Amino acid sequence: MSAEEANTIQDEAPVEVPQKKGKQGKYRRDKPWDTDDIDHWKVEEFKPEYNPAPFTEESSFATLFPKYRENYLKEVWGHVTRALDKVGVACVLDLVEGSMTVKTTRKTYDPYMILKARDLIKLLARSVPLPQALKILEDGIASDIVKIGNIVRNKERFVKRRQRLLGPNGSTLKAMELLTQCYVMVQGNTVSAMGPYKGLKEVRRIIIDCMNNVHPIYHIKELMIKRELAKDPKLAEENWERFLPHFKKKNTKPLKKKISKKDKKDYTPFPPAQTPSKIDMQLESGEYFMKPKEKEARAMERKKEEQKENSLKRQAERELAYVPPVEDAPKKKKKKSSSSDE
């Protein structure tokens, strides 16, 4: 092999990229196309050009709806059909069985759209109005239906805790929606929520804690502090635990009554003496052998004696008001002797 051929082989050999030291960077390579200005969490729109061929299998989902939603669903079903036709999903309303069904067609291009349509019919069944429910078809918006019926067994307690979610004139619910950027609908034994994934996580935590006897105002206060801290760029990489409030649970137990220890009596094998009955007491006083009229006369005498005693007590109380109070005798002022008089 000549020297020229050896030089050409060395030039054609691949240039080794310097690797990072340590186990973590053993197989890592530089990515010049991956810059800091790229948002990796951005959800890009799925266009029909990405999936020109139809699906090989049909997917379908069905859900039942309550009887009171039948009239509303009949009125708006035309709008639901038109909205789902735009994304290539078919829908069927069965009033006999009381169910709604969505299924893919040959025009469906987005594989995830059938799951969005499933969430749409679930929200419609849980009394969410149609204009709000149709927002679930947009990218970046998800839904969550929290079941709260089985958390609390007592019916009265369940109603009170569910009312806490709404608050006076719906103020608590409105504050929750503003802080989490979610739509929340409390209906029966479920709570429906729509919004971004981060907000849905907070909403679920607030709802479950509220049904477990933790007031929503504590979470709302925490979210307000977090929102203010997020505005400060200096605190972006710091731990916020020191700024957040820590509420301690206080269970006030009723005070136990102090039981006075009785002195132990000497043990006797004989039972205590029987308490005298009413008849025994009448026999002792001789009242048992009296006639009914004599008994009435005796009762009247007792009553009159009690009345006399009570009247004397009242009269003494009245007379106390007329007793003059003891007045202090006025002190005589001593005249100071002046030097001029002398």
Image (tube, grey):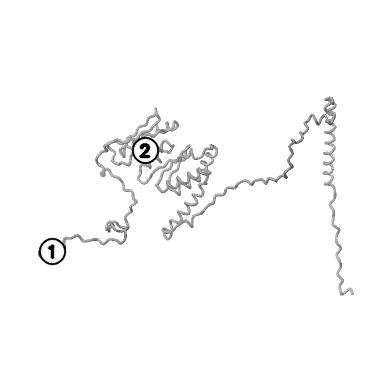
Question: For numbered disc 2, what is the local secondary structure?
Answer: helix
* Foreground: disc 1 or disc 2: 1
Q: Which residue is mark 2?
A: 118
Q: Nearer the viewer, residue 22 or 302?
A: 22
> For numbered disc 1, what is the local secondary structure?
helix
Viewport quadrant of the C terminus: bottom right
User: Which corner quadrant holds the N terminus?
Assistant: bottom left
Relative to 15, 142 lies left or right: right
Percent coordinates x, y for residue 245 in the rendering? 51, 54
Q: At 38% across and 42% down in the image, what residue appears?
A: 136
Answer few, some or many: residues within 10 Å of disc 1's Cα (few below 14, many 20 plus, some between 14 and 19): few
The reply to whether callout 1 and callout 2 are in contact (CB within 8 Å) is: no
Q: Which residue was labeled with disc 1?
A: 6
**Callout 1 amino acid:** Ala
Q: How many marks?
A: 2
Judged left or right of residue 328, residue 48 is: left
Asked if residue 1 lies left or right of residue 178, the reply is left
* Percent x, y of residue 300: 84, 31
* Distance in Å between CA atoms under marks 1 and 2: 67 Å
